[in-house]
Image (cartoon, rainbow, N blue to C red):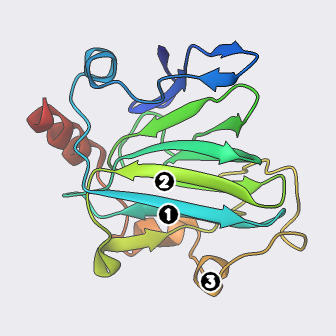
Amino acid sequence: MQIEQLSIEGAYVITPKLHGDARGLFFEWFKDSSFTESVGHPLTLAQANCSVSSKGTLRGIHYADVPPGQAKYVTCLSGAVTDVIVDIRVGSPTFGRWEAVELNTDTRHLVYLSEGLGHGFVAREDNSTVVYLCSTSYNPSGEHEVDPFDPAIGIDWGISREQVSLSAKDAAAPRLAAAAEQGLLPDYEACKQFRVNLA
């Protein structure tokens, strides 16, 4: 498997080696030794989630308070999604930057995002099934969201706000600047120190 850091510190795209023959396909979608060597710390597994989305469903941009934050290791088992990682860490040199990775059954790409980063995806096909390993359990009081169509971030979802299906919570999410003013966003230095403590 190949693990490459994206332009946002703490965000990676993973390309597994696919072994296919007449019977089908096999690949390793997570390997602790390769992950730890590339990222610099192990992935603690506290929860595994699965979502199935109809075409045009947009989930995100979600993030959690740091500490403890919630790192995610994400892949798409069926269908196709555009997965987006946003740097929402106040003080980060790439604050407000976003990266998109296509997750589908052709490339079998995966993404890893460390604590403090925002995450979301839009389904490109019906029954798009996304699974993600999480470093901490879901904590409703520590979970937040940012407007996925905030023009200050400028994510190109390839679909308009009027065309997507959003949860009521995501539709009412504040813009990045408002979340920063309210003190809701993670701090870059605190996130860095948290990751150092994991190593």
Q: Is residue 115 left or right of residue 102?
A: left
Residue at position x 45%, y 36% in the image: 112
Residue at position x 88%, y 57% in the image: 159
Q: Could you tell me the amino acid type at mark 1? A: His
Q: Which residue does the numbered mark 2 point to in the structure image?
A: 118
Asked which quadrant contains residue 180, the reply is bottom left
Q: Is residue 107 shown above or below 87?
A: above
Instruction: Find numbered disc 2 in the image and state the secondary structure of the residue it sits on.
Output: strand
- Distance CA(mark 1)–CA(mark 3): 13 Å
Instruction: Find numbered disc 3 in the image and state the secondary structure of the residue it sits on.
Output: loop
Residue at position x 62%, y 83% in the image: 172
Instruction: Find numbered disc 1 in the image and state the secondary structure of the residue it sits on.
Output: strand
In the rendered image, the residue lying farthest to the bottom is: 168
Asked which quadrant contains residue 109, the reply is top right
Q: Could you tell me the amino acid type at mark 3? A: Ala
Q: Is residue 131 shown above or below 39?
A: below
Q: Residues within 10 Å of mark 3 (few under 14, many from 20)?
A: few
Earlier in the chain: of badge 1 and badge 2, it is 1
